[in-house]
Amino acid sequence: MNATPNPGQAAPKRARRWLLKSGVALVLLALAAVVARSFFFTGPYRAPEPLPEAKLLDIHCHTAGIGAGDSGCFVSPKMRDSYKFSIYLKSFWTSRTEVEQQGDALIIKRISERLGQSRRVGAAIILALDGVVNAQGELDRARTEVYVPNEFVAREVARTTNLLFGASINPLRKDALERLAWAKANGAKLVKWIPSIMQFDPADERLTPFYKKLVELKLPLLTHAGQERSFTHARDELCDPQRLHLPLKLGVTVIVAHIASTGANGGQRDTDRLAPMMAQYTNLFSEISSLTQINKPGHLREALTRPEWRGRLLYGSDFPLINTALVSPWFYPLHLTQRQMRDISALENPWDRDVELKQALGVPGEIFARANGLLRRSDDGNQNERLE
Ligand SMILES: [Zn+2]
């Protein structure tokens, strides 16, 4: 053993000093956070209400697919190679290898199983996603990043007892009206679209027959509005809520996703462009999916406190995003108690976490319950029992 003083000992000393300093800094930071919290803690956005007794309907859930098992789904190579895609697959409790081996239907099966374990949500609408259409009115694969065909979603949800079909149809398809009729006949509860991704203008007069058919078939239209960042490119101006006057005037029940949060058009926030339209149309609704995401600070507060939305909001989760690091009760230290943050984050089921988080922040019972009512009203009765 060498007992002579070692000049190299200066380094461990420096490391110890550094550790001590960072330890003190951390303690001070934590103390500052506790003091700041006690000053700035404001509690929930609204006084929380008990949840409805009946299980909820989630109107906004996504699935995905790579085309495995002849699903007809596809993802552009650019999207497939993006880091986002692996995160999506993980949030569906699966992996690329597993899906390649067992087929895309596995994802819908997993969603159904996990949803079946939820104490709060009893059913969910799984959304197909149509693509970009070319001048001939046919799917333009080269310009489509993600495609989830209606046939795949309709077939796979029919194998479950808790999932419902949300169709997606680009209205510029040459056979758009036939596709609508097919969707309705195959159990569609609504039609979902993302104009900025599917690249059409909802204000285009050529869409009038499509809108009239939606009214005739009593199919609500769930439309994305605001900025879209789940894809690698988007034409956000097409998701301006002010482009929705045409379907609204024709009587379509329009549900604008997540109060058109995060986008802007004409120098105005999309949410501010949507809000005054609520007084103009009684057939206009919105929903609260994705509003607890870290990239949307203040939006749930806006949804719960602005008078324009009163009586018009529905519950949706935007699954699988609720099952990623984008959402956590720990993002709400000024609105939830330590105990609430801990208890909610300990819930294993993503729908239960979503509902409990939103309820604790003040989402009232009527918002949680409205989706069942609205969709039952627009339904011909076939699948009512599945919504209970
Ligand atoms: Zn979504």
Image (tube, grey):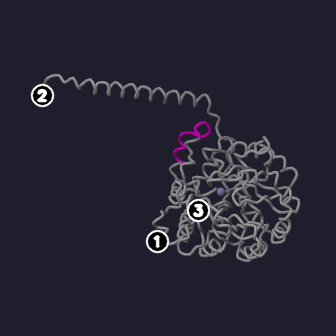
**Three-letter amino acid code at the position of disc 3:** Ser
Q: Earlier in the sequence, mark 1 or mark 3?
A: 3
**Three-letter amino acid code at the position of disc 2:** Asn
Q: Which mark is residue 101?
A: 1
For label 3, the crowd category at 10 Å Cα-Cα, with few meaning under 14, some 14 to 19 and many 20 or more, is: some
Picture quarter with the C terminus: bottom right
Would residue 99 be counted in the magenta stretch?
Answer: no
Q: Secondary structure at mark 2?
A: loop
Instruction: Write the residue at 66% across / 54% down.
Output: 51
Q: Which residue is mark 3?
A: 76
Against 5, residue 154 (above or below) is below
**Three-letter amino acid code at the position of disc 1:** Gln
Q: Whereabouts is ligand 1, in terms of quadrant?
A: bottom right
Q: Which residue is mark 2?
A: 2
Image x and y of residue 274, in percent: 80, 48
Q: Secondary structure at mark 3?
A: loop
Image x and y of residue 31, in percent: 49, 27
Viewer-nearest of discs 3 and 2 = 3
* First to last magenta residue range: 332-344
Q: Secondary structure at mark 1?
A: helix
Q: Is residue 264 visible?
A: yes
